[in-house]
Image (cartoon, rainbow, N blue to C red):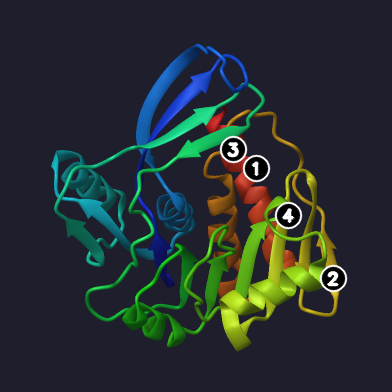
Amino acid sequence: MPRIIVIGSVNHDRIWQLDAPLIPGGRIQFSSQTTRLGGGAFYTGQQLLELGADVAIVSRLMQDEQGQAALKSLAVDGFDVEHIAMLPGETAPLEIFLEPNGERTIIAPAGRSQPLTAAGKLAGAGVYINALALEENLIEQIDAQPLVLTQFPLRPATPRPSDYVISSRDDVPDDLALAWQRAGQIAGPRLKMLVLTDGTRPITLFDGSQTVEVAPADRVDTTNTIGAGDRFAGSFLFALLEGKAPAAAAQDASRITADWLRRRGD
Protein backbone atom coordinates (compact mmCIF):
# COMPACT_ATOMS: atom_id res chain seq x y z
CA MET A 1 0.00 0.00 0.00
CA PRO A 2 1.30 3.51 -0.75
CA ARG A 3 2.29 5.73 2.16
CA ILE A 4 0.74 9.19 1.88
CA ILE A 5 1.41 12.25 4.01
CA VAL A 6 -1.66 14.41 4.67
CA ILE A 7 -0.98 17.93 5.94
CA GLY A 8 -3.78 20.05 7.33
CA SER A 9 -6.41 20.41 10.01
CA VAL A 10 -8.21 17.95 12.23
CA ASN A 11 -11.14 19.87 13.67
CA HIS A 12 -13.97 19.33 16.06
CA ASP A 13 -16.80 20.43 13.74
CA ARG A 14 -19.94 21.62 15.51
CA ILE A 15 -22.57 21.48 12.77
CA TRP A 16 -25.80 23.47 13.20
CA GLN A 17 -28.56 22.36 10.83
CA LEU A 18 -30.51 25.57 10.29
CA ASP A 19 -34.21 25.68 9.43
CA ALA A 20 -33.82 28.76 7.21
CA PRO A 21 -31.07 30.71 5.40
CA LEU A 22 -28.89 33.12 7.32
CA ILE A 23 -30.01 36.73 6.97
CA PRO A 24 -28.59 39.88 8.61
CA GLY A 25 -30.45 40.63 11.82
CA GLY A 26 -32.59 37.51 11.50
CA ARG A 27 -33.76 35.09 14.16
CA ILE A 28 -33.17 31.50 13.02
CA GLN A 29 -33.98 28.14 14.57
CA PHE A 30 -31.94 24.98 14.19
CA SER A 31 -33.23 21.41 13.95
CA SER A 32 -30.08 19.61 15.08
CA GLN A 33 -26.58 20.19 16.38
CA THR A 34 -23.83 17.59 16.22
CA THR A 35 -20.11 17.63 16.94
CA ARG A 36 -17.79 15.31 15.07
CA LEU A 37 -14.21 15.15 13.84
CA GLY A 38 -13.66 16.98 10.56
CA GLY A 39 -11.18 19.13 8.72
CA GLY A 40 -9.29 18.80 5.45
CA ALA A 41 -6.67 16.37 6.71
CA PHE A 42 -9.28 14.21 8.43
CA TYR A 43 -11.65 13.79 5.49
CA THR A 44 -8.89 13.30 2.94
CA GLY A 45 -7.09 10.86 5.21
CA GLN A 46 -10.26 8.87 5.81
CA GLN A 47 -10.77 8.45 2.09
CA LEU A 48 -7.19 7.36 1.56
CA LEU A 49 -7.42 4.81 4.37
CA GLU A 50 -10.58 3.35 2.80
CA LEU A 51 -8.72 3.02 -0.50
CA GLY A 52 -5.95 1.08 1.20
CA ALA A 53 -3.25 3.69 1.74
CA ASP A 54 -0.97 4.02 4.76
CA VAL A 55 -1.73 7.56 5.96
CA ALA A 56 0.33 9.81 8.23
CA ILE A 57 -1.22 13.10 9.36
CA VAL A 58 0.75 16.30 9.98
CA SER A 59 -1.52 18.47 12.12
CA ARG A 60 -2.03 19.78 15.64
CA LEU A 61 -4.41 19.05 18.48
CA MET A 62 -4.82 20.44 21.98
CA GLN A 63 -3.66 18.54 25.05
CA ASP A 64 -7.06 18.70 26.77
CA GLU A 65 -9.49 15.81 27.07
CA GLN A 66 -11.05 16.45 23.66
CA GLY A 67 -7.68 16.61 21.94
CA GLN A 68 -6.47 13.42 23.58
CA ALA A 69 -9.69 11.64 22.63
CA ALA A 70 -9.31 12.80 19.04
CA LEU A 71 -5.71 11.55 18.91
CA LYS A 72 -6.80 8.16 20.20
CA SER A 73 -9.69 8.00 17.73
CA LEU A 74 -7.36 8.76 14.80
CA ALA A 75 -4.96 6.02 15.89
CA VAL A 76 -7.82 3.52 16.23
CA ASP A 77 -8.98 4.44 12.70
CA GLY A 78 -5.54 3.48 11.41
CA PHE A 79 -3.78 6.82 10.99
CA ASP A 80 -0.09 7.24 11.78
CA VAL A 81 -0.31 10.03 14.39
CA GLU A 82 3.42 10.39 15.05
CA HIS A 83 3.54 13.81 13.34
CA ILE A 84 0.57 15.37 15.14
CA ALA A 85 1.73 18.09 17.55
CA MET A 86 -0.06 18.20 20.90
CA LEU A 87 -0.22 21.80 22.12
CA PRO A 88 -1.20 23.22 25.51
CA GLY A 89 -4.65 24.76 25.63
CA GLU A 90 -8.31 23.93 25.13
CA THR A 91 -9.98 22.60 22.01
CA ALA A 92 -12.16 25.20 20.29
CA PRO A 93 -14.75 23.78 17.90
CA LEU A 94 -15.21 24.95 14.34
CA GLU A 95 -18.76 26.27 14.07
CA ILE A 96 -20.50 25.29 10.82
CA PHE A 97 -23.94 26.72 10.03
CA LEU A 98 -25.60 24.50 7.42
CA GLU A 99 -28.57 26.03 5.61
CA PRO A 100 -31.45 23.96 4.15
CA ASN A 101 -30.11 24.45 0.60
CA GLY A 102 -26.65 23.19 1.53
CA GLU A 103 -24.92 26.56 1.83
CA ARG A 104 -22.61 26.69 4.80
CA THR A 105 -20.98 29.39 6.89
CA ILE A 106 -17.85 28.49 8.86
CA ILE A 107 -16.63 30.34 11.94
CA ALA A 108 -13.12 29.41 13.02
CA PRO A 109 -11.28 30.44 16.20
CA ALA A 110 -8.38 32.84 15.81
CA GLY A 111 -4.86 31.41 15.68
CA ARG A 112 -5.45 28.64 13.14
CA SER A 113 -3.03 30.27 10.70
CA GLN A 114 0.01 29.43 12.82
CA PRO A 115 2.54 27.53 10.67
CA LEU A 116 2.44 23.74 10.74
CA THR A 117 5.63 21.84 11.31
CA ALA A 118 6.56 18.17 11.43
CA ALA A 119 8.50 16.36 14.10
CA GLY A 120 10.80 13.79 12.54
CA LYS A 121 11.43 12.89 8.93
CA LEU A 122 8.61 12.54 6.42
CA ALA A 123 8.72 9.99 3.62
CA GLY A 124 5.95 8.80 1.36
CA ALA A 125 4.80 8.14 -2.19
CA GLY A 126 2.64 11.27 -2.15
CA VAL A 127 1.63 14.33 -0.16
CA TYR A 128 -1.67 16.18 0.15
CA ILE A 129 -1.70 19.71 1.62
CA ASN A 130 -4.70 21.65 2.88
CA ALA A 131 -3.11 24.28 5.11
CA LEU A 132 -2.26 27.95 4.87
CA ALA A 133 0.98 28.35 6.83
CA LEU A 134 3.89 25.91 6.71
CA GLU A 135 7.29 26.17 8.42
CA GLU A 136 10.43 26.07 6.32
CA ASN A 137 11.52 22.64 7.55
CA LEU A 138 8.18 21.20 6.44
CA ILE A 139 8.43 22.84 3.02
CA GLU A 140 11.88 21.32 2.52
CA GLN A 141 10.53 17.87 3.36
CA ILE A 142 7.56 18.34 1.02
CA ASP A 143 9.91 19.22 -1.84
CA ALA A 144 11.70 15.89 -1.40
CA GLN A 145 8.51 13.87 -2.00
CA PRO A 146 7.80 12.46 -5.49
CA LEU A 147 4.17 13.63 -5.88
CA VAL A 148 2.50 16.59 -4.18
CA LEU A 149 -1.11 17.79 -4.43
CA THR A 150 -2.22 20.98 -2.70
CA GLN A 151 -5.53 22.72 -2.23
CA PHE A 152 -5.66 26.21 -3.71
CA PRO A 153 -5.53 28.40 -0.57
CA LEU A 154 -8.41 30.84 -0.19
CA ARG A 155 -6.29 33.30 1.81
CA PRO A 156 -2.62 34.37 1.66
CA ALA A 157 -0.54 31.25 2.23
CA THR A 158 2.99 29.89 2.32
CA PRO A 159 4.13 28.78 -1.16
CA ARG A 160 4.70 25.04 -1.31
CA PRO A 161 6.28 22.96 -4.12
CA SER A 162 3.39 21.06 -5.73
CA ASP A 163 2.71 19.09 -8.88
CA TYR A 164 -1.07 19.55 -8.82
CA VAL A 165 -3.25 22.34 -7.44
CA ILE A 166 -6.89 21.47 -6.81
CA SER A 167 -9.84 23.75 -6.10
CA SER A 168 -13.52 24.37 -6.56
CA ARG A 169 -14.23 26.38 -9.71
CA ASP A 170 -16.00 28.97 -7.55
CA ASP A 171 -12.80 29.71 -5.62
CA VAL A 172 -10.51 30.69 -8.52
CA PRO A 173 -10.66 33.40 -11.20
CA ASP A 174 -12.91 32.71 -14.20
CA ASP A 175 -9.91 33.39 -16.44
CA LEU A 176 -8.00 30.07 -16.54
CA ALA A 177 -4.76 31.80 -17.48
CA LEU A 178 -5.02 33.99 -14.38
CA ALA A 179 -5.96 31.00 -12.24
CA TRP A 180 -2.91 29.15 -13.60
CA GLN A 181 -0.69 32.11 -12.78
CA ARG A 182 -1.96 32.21 -9.20
CA ALA A 183 -1.58 28.45 -8.85
CA GLY A 184 2.01 28.82 -10.02
CA GLN A 185 2.67 31.38 -7.32
CA ILE A 186 1.62 28.77 -4.75
CA ALA A 187 3.10 25.64 -6.33
CA GLY A 188 6.24 26.97 -8.01
CA PRO A 189 7.97 25.40 -11.04
CA ARG A 190 6.80 21.85 -10.20
CA LEU A 191 3.23 22.70 -11.20
CA LYS A 192 1.88 20.30 -13.84
CA MET A 193 -1.86 20.79 -13.67
CA LEU A 194 -4.72 22.77 -12.17
CA VAL A 195 -7.75 20.64 -11.23
CA LEU A 196 -11.09 22.42 -10.83
CA THR A 197 -14.28 20.75 -9.62
CA ASP A 198 -17.61 22.42 -10.32
CA GLY A 199 -20.44 20.54 -8.64
CA THR A 200 -22.52 18.74 -11.25
CA ARG A 201 -20.69 20.50 -14.10
CA PRO A 202 -17.57 19.10 -15.81
CA ILE A 203 -14.26 18.87 -13.93
CA THR A 204 -11.64 21.09 -15.61
CA LEU A 205 -8.02 19.99 -16.01
CA PHE A 206 -5.69 22.77 -17.22
CA ASP A 207 -1.94 22.43 -17.78
CA GLY A 208 -1.24 26.04 -18.67
CA SER A 209 -2.04 25.64 -22.35
CA GLN A 210 -4.57 22.85 -22.89
CA THR A 211 -7.93 22.25 -21.20
CA VAL A 212 -9.56 18.86 -20.68
CA GLU A 213 -13.09 18.56 -19.33
CA VAL A 214 -14.17 15.41 -17.48
CA ALA A 215 -17.81 14.51 -16.95
CA PRO A 216 -18.58 14.11 -13.22
CA ALA A 217 -20.51 11.26 -11.66
CA ASP A 218 -24.30 11.42 -11.54
CA ARG A 219 -25.76 14.02 -9.21
CA VAL A 220 -26.36 12.97 -5.60
CA ASP A 221 -29.33 14.60 -3.87
CA THR A 222 -27.91 15.89 -0.60
CA THR A 223 -27.80 19.16 1.31
CA ASN A 224 -24.62 18.26 3.18
CA THR A 225 -21.45 18.18 1.09
CA ILE A 226 -19.07 18.85 4.00
CA GLY A 227 -15.90 16.86 3.33
CA ALA A 228 -16.75 16.00 -0.29
CA GLY A 229 -14.01 18.16 -1.80
CA ASP A 230 -11.40 16.66 0.51
CA ARG A 231 -12.57 13.15 -0.31
CA PHE A 232 -12.35 13.95 -4.02
CA ALA A 233 -8.77 15.18 -3.55
CA GLY A 234 -7.75 12.02 -1.70
CA SER A 235 -9.27 9.76 -4.35
CA PHE A 236 -7.62 11.78 -7.14
CA LEU A 237 -4.19 11.53 -5.52
CA PHE A 238 -4.59 7.80 -4.91
CA ALA A 239 -5.53 7.21 -8.57
CA LEU A 240 -2.46 9.16 -9.72
CA LEU A 241 -0.29 6.98 -7.50
CA GLU A 242 -1.84 3.94 -9.18
CA GLY A 243 -0.47 5.28 -12.46
CA LYS A 244 -3.71 6.61 -13.92
CA ALA A 245 -3.76 9.65 -16.19
CA PRO A 246 -5.26 12.83 -14.64
CA ALA A 247 -8.54 12.58 -16.59
CA ALA A 248 -9.06 8.97 -15.48
CA ALA A 249 -8.07 9.90 -11.93
CA ALA A 250 -10.68 12.68 -11.93
CA GLN A 251 -13.36 10.26 -13.13
CA ASP A 252 -12.45 7.79 -10.39
CA ALA A 253 -12.46 10.52 -7.75
CA SER A 254 -15.84 11.84 -8.82
CA ARG A 255 -17.42 8.37 -8.73
CA ILE A 256 -15.91 7.48 -5.35
CA THR A 257 -17.01 10.80 -3.82
CA ALA A 258 -20.55 10.39 -5.15
CA ASP A 259 -20.72 6.88 -3.69
CA TRP A 260 -19.62 8.24 -0.31
CA LEU A 261 -22.26 10.99 -0.39
CA ARG A 262 -24.94 8.39 -1.14
CA ARG A 263 -23.82 6.21 1.77
CA ARG A 264 -23.69 9.12 4.19
CA GLY A 265 -26.97 10.76 3.16
CA ASP A 266 -27.91 14.10 4.72
Label 2 packing within 10 angstroms: few (<14), some (14-19), many (20+):
few
Residue 155 image label: none
Residue 211 image label: 2
| Residue 108 visible in the current orientation | yes
CB atoms at circles 2 and 3 under 8 Å apart? no
Q: Report the Cα–Cα distance between label 2 and label 3.
A: 26 Å
Q: At label 4, which amino acid type do we have?
A: Arg
Q: Is residue 9 left or right of residue 229?
A: left
Judging by the rendered image, the residue that carries numbered circle 4 is 169
Question: Where on the picture, by quarter, is residue 232?
Answer: bottom right
Q: Is residue 86 left or right of residue 226?
A: left
Q: Position of residue 87 (x, y in %)?
A: 18, 56
Label 3 packing within 10 angstroms: few (<14), some (14-19), many (20+):
some
Judging by the rendered image, the residue that carries numbered circle 1 is 258
Q: Position of residue 7 (x, y in %)?
A: 40, 65
Q: Report the Cα–Cα distance between label 3 and label 1.
A: 10 Å
Say what secondary structure mark 2 lies in: strand
Q: Report the Cα–Cα distance between label 1 and label 4.
A: 18 Å
Residue at image point 41% right, 67% down: 133
Q: At label 2, which amino acid type do we have?
A: Thr
Judging by the rendered image, the residue that carries numbered circle 3 is 225
Q: Position of residue 98 (x, y in %)?
A: 54, 28
Q: At label 1, which amino acid type do we have?
A: Ala
